[in-house]
Each structure stands twice: as structure tokens, then as C-alpha cells.
Image: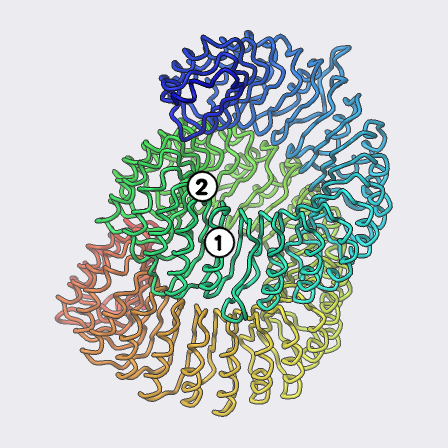
Amino acid sequence: MQKLNEFTIGIHTVEIQSTCKLEQVLVNYSLPPCLEVLRISDNTLDEEDIFALIRSLRNMKGLHELDLCCTRFTESSFNCFITVLIKCSDLRRLCLTDNGLTKQDVNYLITAFESLKNLKNLNLSKNNVTETQANDILQKYGEGNSIVSLDLSQNALQGNEIIVRICKLDSLEEVNLSHNHIRFHPLPSLEEGSNKFPINTKIISLSSNHMIPNDICRFLSLIRSDLLKLNLDFNHVGNSIWSLCSLRIFKHLKVLSLASTDICGPAVDGLAILLSSVTELEELNLSSNNLMLEDFRNLQSHLSNLTRLKKLNLSNNNLDGITVILQEILPSLNYLEELRLSNVRLNGDDCNKIYESLKFLRSLKYFDLSINAIGPDGTRALANILKEIPLLEGLDVSKSCIKEYAIDLFCKALVPLNKLRHLNLSGNRIDIEILDDALSLPPNLQELILSDIIHGGKLFVNMIPLQHQLRILHLSKIKLRLCDADRLAAMLSSFRLLQELVLTNVDVADRKCEKIFSAIKLLKNLKKLDLGGMKVNNGKAFIEIFSSLLFLKEIVFPDVLIHDDGVIGCFDALRSLTYLKNLHLGRSTITQTGAVTLANVLPSLQLLEKLVLKKIEFDDECQKHLFHAVGKLKYLKELDLGWSKTTHTGAVTLAEVLPSLQLLEKLVLKKIEFDDECQKHLFHAVGKLKYLKKLDLGWSKITQTGAVTLAEVLPSLQLLEKLVLRDIKFDDEHQKHLFHAVGKLKYLKKLVLRFSKITQTGAVTLAEVLPSLQLLEKLLLEGIIEVDDECQKHLFHAVGKLKYLKKLDLGWSKITQTGAVTLAEVLPSLQLLEKLVLRDIKFDDEHQKHLFHAVGKLKYLKKLVLRFSKITQTGAVTLAEVLPSLQLLEKLLLEGIIEVDDECQKHLFHAVGKLKYLKKLDLGWSKITQTGAVTLAEVLPSLQLLEKLVLQDIEFDDECQKHLFHAVGKLKYLKELDFWYTTITQTGAVILAEVLPSLQLLEKLVLQDIEFDDECQKHLFHAVGKLKYLKELYFWYSTITQTGAVTLAEVLPSLQLLEKLVLNVIEFDDECQKHLFHAVGKLKYLKELDLRWSKITQTGAVTLAEVLPSLQLLEKLVLKKIEFDDECQKHLFHGVRKLKYLNELDFALSEITQTGAVTLAEVLPSLQLLEKLVLKNIEFDDECQKHLFHAVGKLKYLNELDFGLSEITLAGVAALTDVLPSLCNLRWIFLSKIKSDETEISSNEESEENESVEIKTAKSKLEVAARLVPGLQIRWN
């Protein structure tokens, strides 16, 4: 600083970063008197900083630019900052972006503008400035006549008053009003001379205002100059595109952005005319408009004439066959620097076809081909294309179906690209073990995104040369052996300049992550760390990383069990993270002690904007402390309490503190227990959150009184875009009030009324208010709407007026014949609909015909669900007629009962075969005949993108099975194959064994009932063993023989990624069980083991006890039928004790002895995540029952407790009664017998009169205790 002070004369720009305390900088360094630009970015300023700045500015001649982007102000310091602004009277540019200003702060700011007469550039984005405040600022500024650039994006502007004020800014050249709720129609009367935008205004951004065509037309009528840039992204432009064509204001346009603007159908002709007039265009964005190939034929010649184009984005359009167009237009785009073709239905052949055209794009710097089925052939073509693009800086080929051997070839083509900085290969599986050479990477990468890596040790070694360049690294869904984890740690420790690290859903064998955490600790420049989904055994090692990561802004915790002895240290360590903005505790289990510590720490995290607490266990007093702490986070924008159970006291405290969270935009309270009075207070508090955009009340049960209050406050939440209410069960009058209130939320885009019983009156009111929700895109009425014909007519007519609707889910609503007729009438008007869910359809032939014909007109439909519906013969015929017109369909779920004859099935499945983009086909419980199966075998090979196939009830002989399974074998992208409830013959099993190895991407295989002998089982299991990416394997009711079990034992270790294994019925002796269970013990990533009705011997149980501790990720263990003595039970239960992530333990009919029960009582408290416990057959005395139930009482997350046939004594009932209040998440208890000294009776209605007084008393006390746990039900067998 001293040396710097000696050379200040020529310095005109000073930037002070977030790591520097402003006051300390200014004490040691004098700002030069000729300073023109001062930037203080991402900092936090207190009064000392402000006073130091005021002193420094005294010697300056005239500051021209002051930029405080992302800088926050402590209590009352912003008021002092106004003095700084007043002193800077020569200021030309002021940037106050994302400063977390309160309403009062903005009001202070308004007073300063009288002094800033020379201001030309004003940026107040992301500060929740209201329209009134914006107008006051411009008015104080003397109508802002000298303002050239105005940025009010991402604020809380509504309506049209700001437009009136902007029309008076005579010098305005650039205006950004994006991410607001601006409306141009209708406009108030404009003064003569100020009735249009200023003549110099040439750059306008109005993206994400969700304007409708009337607004667009009125907006365009205000423009009177030739525009240079126009951004209308995420507005409903539609046919108002014709208004743009009619204006002569675009001949010099350089940038046109029309992403997600509903330009489709007739509007495309208008777009063609518009493009013909913008020959100087340099940037064009037409992404996410559902444009089809035919549309681009109309645009082709005009696109070819845009020879100055530098950026072109056509992503997320339905451009099957687009290569024909690209071959024509690309050669003329010689200046193109950025080409985005994500999710445009390209395949491998297309890449080959456009190779020659792409050779002309020598200036290309960014290329996006993500979410296309490029496949191996396309990858080879792409490798050749890359050789022709030497200037490439960014490449995205994520989710492109690139296979391992092609990845190697592809990456070798990348190595010569010295300018490549950004590479995204995520969503393409990388199995390092099958590559001939270690994967090569370009030498100068700064950002690398990979996923689905299996055993990446060699890759990590090869990445070390990137240590001096890499800034962003994402590695998700990776499987690591211990040697791989060591290499990952070694690699990470070398990346000292890394700023962002994402390691999500990482499975490390034995959960030994200590070395990885030690490496992360060395990354002192890290600003974002996401470890979500990583299961961690050693919480202490994770805690220690915080001491060195002082600049962290975002942290997502792994799934770590932090015990009370470590939790204090964990949250205390967070105090040092003074720059933290996002704190997400993931699925970590936070104890009472942890919640108390967190409450003490939170107030020190003053910059926190996002807080996610998914799973906290805390009592009333603790909730009070925690929520009071949350109330001190004045910059908080998102509060998500997930499934944490909020008590009455907690809800009362929340009601007190919510009004202090004035910047809150998202509030998720899924699980609250509150009475009428409490609901009133809480909802009144919610009503004061003026910037709230999302409100999710999850499973919180709202009372009548609560509904009244909610109806009162909802209209005040004028910016609300998403509302989720479940389990609404209140009377007609209350539903009327609530739905009328919902109807006033004019910016609402998503409305979810899930599992709610909507009455006739409620439905009538909904029908009245829905048309006022003009921006609604998602409507989920997944509850039960029981209304008559007339009401359904009104309701569906109202739905038909939601012209921007993209998702309609009518859940379990019973649609009548009349309702079906109306639905058929209105569906064609929902032209943007992409997802339609109808359950429980039970109406006659004629009505099904009309409805399905209407569905056939939804040409942008991507998902059709007809679940649990009985489709008639006539309905199926109609469906067969219309399906081919749904060319964009990706998911088809016909999970109901389709009872149709052979001929009809032929037609239906031939129609399905024409859906070439289909990725998921689920025929659920539909009974497929022999003829239907033959037809399916014919058409399946044409569904080349199919990833999931569910055929649960097929009747087919040997020959038919051969054909069908051979057809399945051709589905090269298949990931899930489900034949549940289908009987597969010996011949079929043989064919299945032949074809399974060709399904190399298969991750889930469900086979319920197979008739196969020893030899056949050997072949089939050997075939299964070749599915190296298999994650789930189910053999439900297929009897596996001794020979089959031996073969399984051989092949299981090769299924290294297996997470779920269900083997219901195995016939195996002691020696075989030993081999099989040792094989199971090698499945390091196993999360579910279900041996259900397989009879496990003493020897088998001993082996299981040995191997269970190696299954460190196990979450579900089902062993219903074990024969084991006392000693064996001790060993087995001690083995279970080490399964820290277990959430379901089912011993069903396994006979547990007194000794076993004693051991269980010892081990249960260590299973802190247990949610379901089934012990149906235990022999235990009074003392043992007391110990066992007290142990159960420590399982804080227990949801279901099943003692089935076990005889419970009076002492046991008393112990259970004592612990029930501590089991606040318990919902079900299943009990059978209560045994006293004199009598043993089954506690059902028939024997109630024979119960002794003491048994009745015990039951009564148990039921009283159960009532203290909301939602708990006791069932007596």
C-alpha cells in the first residue's frame, strides 16, 4: 500500500474486492485526486467504512463512476452512504445492483437524486424497487432529462406508471426493465410530446415480464426510432409478431431475442417477414418456441441472408431433419461465433450430414449440441468437425448418448483445441476401466463438467495438468473405489485456484471420504461447494474444511450424521464464513443440540440469502431460538424448512419473525402443526411479505379459520407466481373465499391443489376465477373434485381459457360423461399444452372418441398419462388414430385397464410405433394378448430413443416371447425394463439371456415370474452379470434354485453399481448361502437388500452378520424368514448396528428370541434414520420389552412400527406409552396381543368384552398417549 501511494497520480480507476475491508484499505491507501471510477464490489460496508470513504472523497476533483455491485450495508450504514452520493455531484454513472435494499433504504436513496444532476447511467437492478419508488427517483432527478441508460431490471415494478415516466426521459438511449411485471395495455393518457419512447431509445430489454399480445402491440406503438437491440424473451408474443413486421424500426437491428415467446403456428409467417427486414442482425435467439421443421423451411432463405450473424440460438425446438436447413444456411454465416442447437432432435446421421457445412464456421467460439441423441456415429463425426474449429472456447455435449469408446475418441479430438475453456460432458457415462488409454483433456480448461463416472482414478490423474487454469469443476453421480477416492483427493489438492466445486451424489466405497475433505480444505479460493447426496461416515472430517474455506458463498452439506458431540463444532465453524449467502443442509440429520447451536450461529451469517433446513429435530424452546435467529437474517430471500416438523410454538415464533424478512421471495413450510389462532397470526405475517413469489404449505393442514385468514392476505401477495396447498378440507363458504382470493393473484404461473377435496361450491368458484389467471402455465388439481355435470362444464370451460397452460393434471377427479364432452371441446384451445394427466376415466365409447380426438389436436404434447382408466375398445381405436399426430410425445403412460381385442391392439401398437421420440412407454396393468405382443415385437425397434419400457401383464407363448425379446434387444438406449406380473416361460428366459447383454445401458430390470430350470437360470444370470451398469435387479416371485443361486453368487460381484437387489424366493443350502451373501457383501453401493421369503439358515445368518458392515450405504433391509439361535441373533443385530443410513428394517416372521430382543434394544438407538421397523414375531419378557420400547423411543424419525404377532405384556404397553410422545413422526403402530398374568387376548372387537380391567386401562393410556402424536393411528391385528 505504501508503494502504491507513491504512484497514484496517473490512476483513474480503483476496484476494491470483497476480501478487502474498505476502512482498512483507505487508512493505508489514499484515493488519487484524479480518480474517475471507484468500484467496491461484493463487499459489506459498515459506518466506519462509509465515514472512511467520505474522508477519502474530500480531496478528489470529481468522481464520474461509482459501482457498488452486490455490496451490502449493515444496520443504518446505508443512511450514512447517502452523504457519499450527495458529495459526488459530478457522478455520471451509478450502479447499485443486488444490494438488498429495504423499502426504507430506497426511500433514503430518493432524497439523494436531487444532487445528481449530471447522472447519465443509472443501474438499480435487483433491489426490489417498486414502481412508485422508481417514479419518485426519476421525479426527484428533475424528470431525469440527462439519463442515457436506465436499468431497473429484476425489481418489483408492476403496471404501467413507469412507462409514462420513461416517455419523458428525452435523452434515454438504453432501458432495461427485464424480470418485472410491466404492463403496456391499457396505458393512461400520455402527454402531448411525451406520448412515445424518446427518439434516441435504441436498446430495449423487456424479457421475463410475461406480457401478453395486447401489451406487445401497445409497446411497439410507442417506439419511434430505429432499434439496435430488442429482447422480448419469456413474454407471450405469439401473433403480435405481426405488429413488429408492420413497423419500420428494425433495419439497423443488431440483436433480436425471442426465446420462449410462443411464436409458433401462424406466427411463424410473421417471423419470416420480420427476419427479411433485419439484414444487419448479429444475434438471434429463437429458442424454446416449439418451432417445427416445416416452420424453418419458411425461415430458411431469410436466415441465409443474415450474413453478419455472430450468435444463433435454435435450442429446444422440434427440428427433426433440421440438417437439411442447416446445410443451406450455415455456409453463409461466416462470422458466426456462437451456435446453440441443444435439444433439437439431432442424431448421429445428422452430425455426419452437417460436417461439410460446419467447416465454414472458422470463427466459431461456442458450440452447444447438448440433449441430442448423437450416439457413437455422431461422436466420430463431431470429432472430425472439431478439427475444423480451432478458435472454439466453449463446447456443451451433455446428455448426448455418447458411449465410453466414443468418449475416448472424442476427447482426443479436443486436445489440440488450445483455446477451449469450457467443456460440459455430463450425462454421458464414462467408465474409465474400459478405455484403452487414460482420458485426454484440452490443456487450458477453466470449466469442466462431468457426470456418471465409474472408477475414475486414471481420469483424475490425467486432470492434474489443469491445476493452473481450472476454476470450475463439477463431478456428479460418480462411483469411487478407495483407490479412486485417493486419486480424486490428490487431484483436488493440486487445484489451488478452484472457485467452484460440485461433488453431488458421489458414492465412495465404505464412505471413507476423509482424504477428499483434506484435499478440499486446501482450496482456499473456493466460493461454492456442493456435496449434496454424498454419504459421509466421518462428520468430523467434513467439519474441519470450514476453517480454511473463508471465502465460501454457497455450501450444500453432504448426507452426514453429525452427532451431538460434533455438531457444536460443525455449526460453530460456520461463523468464520462471513461471505456465505446460501446455506443448504441437504439431507443431513440435525439433532436438537445441532438446532440450538445453529440458532446461535445464524445471526453472524448476515449476508445469508438462502437457508434450507430439510430435516431438523427440535422441540418448542429450540424452535423459538432458531426462528428468532432466522428473523435476524435481513437479506434472506429463500427459507425452506422441508420436512422439518414445526410445532405450534414454532409457528407462533415464525409469525413474529417473518415480517422482518422483508426481502423473502420463497417460503416452504411443508409440515406445520397449528391451531386456528396460530394460523391467523402466521398467515397475517405471510401477508406482509410483499416480494414473495413462491408459497408452499405442503402437508400443513389448514383449518377453516386459517382458510379465512389466507383468503384475506393472499391478494396482498401481488408478486406470487407459485402457490401450493395440499389437503384442503373445509366447507363451501370457506372454499369460495379462498378461491376468490387466489383469483386476484394476476401473476400466478403455477397452482397446486394436491390431495384436496374440492366441493361443488369450491369448483364453481374456481371456474369463476380461473380465467382471471391469464398467465397460468401449470394447473394441478390432484385432489378429489366431486361435482355434478353442470359444474364440470363450467370448470372445464374456464380451464379452456388458460391459453398459456402447459401442464394440466386432473389427478383423482372423477370426470363424468358431460365433463368429458366439455373437456373434449376445450382441449384444442390449449395449444401450448405439453403435459396432460387424466386418471380414473370411466365413460362410454362415444365420449372416449370425442376426448381422444381432442387430445390428438395437442400437437406440442410431450407427456400423456391415462392412469387407472378403463379404456374401451372404441376408445382404444380412437387413440390409435390420433397418436401418430402427437409427433412430439416423449412419455406415454396407459397404466389403466385396456381391455381390447387382438385387432384393436394391433392398430394401437402400430400407432405407438410411429412415436419416434418416445422415451417412456408404460402399459401398466393393461392386458396384452398374444396378437398384441406380436405387434409390439414388430414396432419396438422403431422406438430407438426408448429408455423405459413397462409391460406388466402379457399373455404370450414361447414363439411370441422369442420375437418380443429379440425386439427389446434392439433398444440400444433402454435403461429400464419391467415385466412385473408377466409370466416368462423357459423358452422366453433363454431368449432373454441372449438379448440382455445387448442392452448395455440397462439400469433397472424387473422380472416377476419366470419358469426356468437350473441350466436356464445359469444362462440368464450370466447374462444379467454382463449388465455392468445395472442399479436395480428384481426377481419378485421367480423361484431361484440352488444352481441359480450359485450362479448369482458368481455374477453379483460384477454388478458393481447395484443399489437395489430383490430376491424373493431362493432355495439354497448352507454352503450356497455363504457364497451368495459373501457376493452380496461386495456390492459396495447397495442401498436396498430384500430377501423377503427366502429361507435363511443359521449358517446364512452368520454370513450375513459378517458382510452387512461392508454395506455402508444400505437403507433398506428385509429378512422376513430367518432361522437363527441366540448367539447368531446377537452377531446379526450387531452387524445391523453398523448400517448408519438404514431407514427400513423388516424381520417380519423371523423368530426373535429373548437374547435377540435384548441385543436389538442395544443397537436400535444407533439407527438414527430408521423410519420403518417390523418385528412381528418376538419372544420377550417384561424387562426386555421395557428396554426394547425405550430403545424404540430414541428413533426420532420412526414413521411405522409393526409388532404384528408379537405378544406385548402390560409392562411393554406401559413402556410404549411412555415413549410415544417422543416419536413425533410416528404415523402407524400395528399390535396384536396384550398379555397379562391371568389372560392373553387378541385386542380386537370380538374379545373386547373379555378384556381384564388392567388391559383396558393399559390400552386406554396407550390411546391417550397416541393422541399426543398428531396423525398417529394404532391398528390391532
Report whether residue 1007 is seen: yes
Q: Position of residue 14 (x, y in %)?
A: 49, 22
Which amino acid is tagged 1?
Pro
Q: Position of residue 1008 (x, y in %)?
A: 50, 78
Q: Quadrant of residue 639?
A: top left
User: Which sits in the foreground, 587 or 933?
Assistant: 587
User: Which sits in the foreground, 1033 or 850?
Assistant: 1033
Q: Single out the mark in the foreground, 1 or 2.
A: 1
Position above or below: 257 against 510: above
User: Which sits in the foreground, 915 or 96?
Assistant: 96
Q: Earlier in the sequence, mark 1 or mark 2?
A: 1
- Colour setup of the view: rainbow
In which quadrant of the rendered image does the N terminus lie? top left
User: Which sits in the foreground, 357 or 830?
Assistant: 357
Numbered badge on residue 465: 1
Q: Which residue is mark 2?
A: 668
Position above or below: 1246 against 204: below
Around disc 1, counting alpha carbons within 10 Å, would you say few (fewer than 14), some (14 to 19), or many (20 or more)? Answer: some
Q: Is residue 1089 left or right of residue 866?
A: left
Q: Position of residue 229 (x, y in %)?
A: 73, 30
Position above or below: 622 against 354: above
Find numbered disc 2 in the image and state the secondary structure of the residue it sits on: strand
Q: Is residue 1103 left or right of residue 1184?
A: right
Position above or below: 740 against 915: above
Which amino acid is tagged 2?
Val
Numbered badge on residue 1018: none
Q: Position of residue 1228 (x, y in %)?
A: 34, 59
Q: Is residue 575 left or right of residue 971?
A: left
**Distance of mark 1 from mark 2, alpha carbons?**
44 Å
